[in-house]
Amino acid sequence: MSVHKEIRKVTTHVLLEMKQRGEKISMLTAYDYTMAKIIDSSGIDVVLVGDSASNVMAGHETTLPITLDQMIYHASSVVRAIDRALVVVDLPFGSYQANSKEALNSAIRTMKESGAHAIKLEGGKEVKESIERILTAGIPVMGHLGLTPQSIYKFGTYEVRAKEDEEADRLMEDAKLLEQYGCFAIVLEKIPAALATQVAKSLTIPVIGIGAGGGVDGQVLVTHDMLGMTHEFSPRFLRRYLNLYESMGNAFKQYIADVKSKSFPSKKEQY
Ligand code: KIV
């Protein structure tokens, strides 16, 4: 008899059941093994290996520079840590927009080389063929609408999207199309709460929001932001659960002082 506890792994079907019974879905980003281990053992439903790694891990201003190889490296580190959560990986900018064959190759490489469970890509009807082709290979696809950071140079700012009727109508139409194409869930980023609620009510698949209010089926945040490790970034939607920038800084200062004063290592901390 196995001594291991049975863990019910989160699948795309589990997420659908959660929406159907009104249980909110929790999702956080992770880019490395250690963080993913802590997040997964805390009971998160979905871990997103976001292309926000480009900003958070590599210090780029946008998500555009991160490569497919770099995303696969982050994703494989995360997957090694996960026992329960569904691991979704962003296809990075330039790895799926050119044509559906390239999109499928990028998705296959991501799944095969990282061991992740699903991919996410940005856009609506313009990525129809890519989504449908990726799905033919049995790879679950999560959509992403609203503020899609890979299009930041088209938008020009990180302001709230779809405030005007025309863009809101287009977003609603795209959300319905993503469901029709076969996406198992959609992320809505930085759009009015009323619109996000309407989208979530109109779809059977789960809608996960970031800066999209409480009327959607789940929430996602960038882990380093919610832990207060990043401190230059303070959008209204961000709830900080810790101020790790300050407490880590204090720990580092204390260590430096201990080294300089020779109080570290003590007799007990040596062989
Ligand atoms: O890359 C990312 O972290 C994301 C989330 C903000 C949804 O796409």
Image: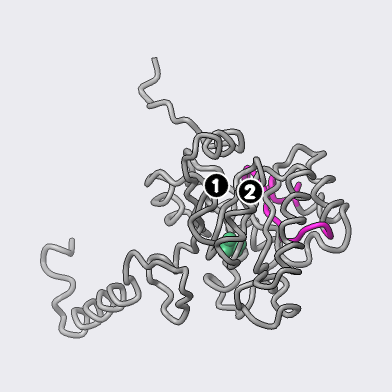
**Residue marked by disc 1:** 79
Amino acid type at circle 2 is: Ser
Q: Secondary structure under badge 2?
A: helix
Ligand 1 is in which quadrant of the figure?
bottom right
**Contact, CB < 8 Å: mark 1 with mark 2?**
yes
Secondary structure type for disc 1 = helix
93 above or below 235? above
Q: Nearer the viewer, residue 211 or 135?
A: 211
Vertical comparison of 87 with 63: above or below? above
Q: Amino acid at mark 1?
A: Val
Q: Is mark 2 within 8 Å of ligand 1?
A: no
Q: What residue appears at the point 67 percent right and 69 percent down from the top-left corner?
A: 162
Q: Residue at x 70, y 83 (%)?
A: 156
Quadrant for the C terminus in the image: bottom left
x then y, percent, for residue 68: 71, 61
Horizontal arrangement in the rendering, residue 260 relative to residue 151 (left or right): left
Q: CA distance from mark 1 to mark 2?
A: 7 Å
Q: Position of residue 171 (x, y in %)?
A: 72, 61
Q: Residue at x 70, y 51 (%)?
A: 110
Q: Where residue 122 sits in the image (x, y, percent)?
A: 72, 61
Q: Nearer the viewer, residue 9 or 122?
A: 122
Q: Is residue 182 left or right of residue 102?
A: left
Residue at mark 2 = 114
**Residue at the extreme top:** 1
Which residue is rendered at x = 15% and y = 84% of the image? 261
User: What stretch of residues is rendered in magenta?
Assistant: 107-126
Residue sitting nearer the eye, 192 or 230: 192
Query: How is this picture coloured?
Result: one colour
